[in-house]
Image (cartoon, rainbow, N blue to C red):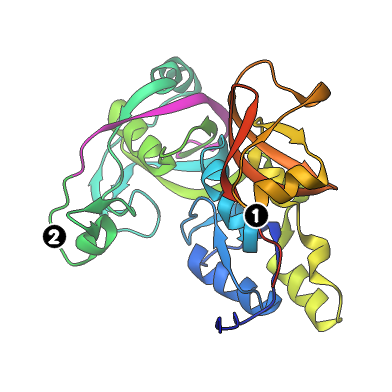
Amino acid sequence: MARRKKGNPVHGWLVLDKPLDMTSTRAVGILKRLYFAQKVGHAGTLDPLATGILPIAFGEATKTVPFAVEGEKVYRFTVRWGAETATDDAEGEVVASGEGQPTVKDIEALLPQFTGEIMQVPPRFSAIKVDGERAYALARDGEDVVLEARPVFIDELRLIDVPDNDSAVFEARCGKGTYVRAIARDLGRTFGCRGHVIALRRTRVGPFSEENAVGLDEIEDATEAGEDLTSFLQPVEIALGEILEVNVSPSDAADLAQGRSVLIRGRDAPVLGGAAYAMSKGRIIALGEIEKGALHPTRVFNFGG
């Protein structure tokens, strides 16, 4: 007899506006408790000193996390000139300093060098693994962490504001694996004045944005009021973005649910192959690949208990 899973079978995405001074893991733990959910995960870690969009996946939505992680991200961040820190943000000790803050003209002239595909060395205090250990754990233990430069893609990097001579506010649109703290560090090094991030907010992850975000306090208030917390959830398939959607009959849905391929007929029949997901009666059934007119399921969704 199968062991009964602890918690409720909650499914969907919650777009959390993560507060300051909270780890992503802690945020997931709080939401799992509030929803008493069987399974919860997140897409794209946010540092404790960062705020903003942290997509939380419940239940079957965890199967779509890889697609959410691959989505474009938008960050707004403030760089303080004059000092580089061990962590590349305000939490670390100063390891280098410089003088001569850049002007607006200097900054705007340099930004094209930080767009498109660039080589970036991740911060020593990051979640990247080195010989099986997280880089930040090794760095905290005093080990000399050396990370290799790797290619990242920055679609756009804009100067938003210059509050004073010692700081500047930027907005970056970038792909998976880009570290905003590294952008601040490298800008400061290029100018010779050094720099680090003092404020960081993520405003978008793929289809998830501030427009449909909710704060922890709002969810906690709704819990105390006895409201239905599922009203805060977005559909499982929202994370699939530009992937082709096809609608299938109940009989085809039953086959897909058993892992069997089905032919895509009628107006939903795709001209080309590629990734697709199947919907039936408003619910996602399977995710897979279309080849020669048939959908071959690779992930099947089960919304039972």
Q: Is residue 289 visible?
A: yes
Region rendered in magenta: 147-166
Q: Quadrant of residue 136 in the image?
A: bottom left
Residue matched to label 2: 143
Is 42 drawn above or below residue 111 in the view shown? below
- Local crowd size for mark 1, using a 10 Å CA cut-off: few (<14), some (14–19), many (≥20): some
Q: What amino acid type is highlighted by mark number 1?
A: Phe
Secondary structure that dominates the magenta span: strand
Q: Is residue 158 magenta?
A: yes
What residue is shown at x 67% (from left), y 38% (from top)? Answer: 277
Residues 184 and 121: in front is 121
Residue 275 in the image: state x and y as whole percent.
Answer: 58, 31
Disc nearest the viewer among 2 and 1: 1
Residue matched to label 1: 301
What residue is shown at x 21% (from left), y 58% (from top)? Answer: 132
Q: Is residue 204 visible?
A: no
Is 80 drawn above or below residue 258 in the view shown? above
Q: Is residue 221 magenta?
A: no
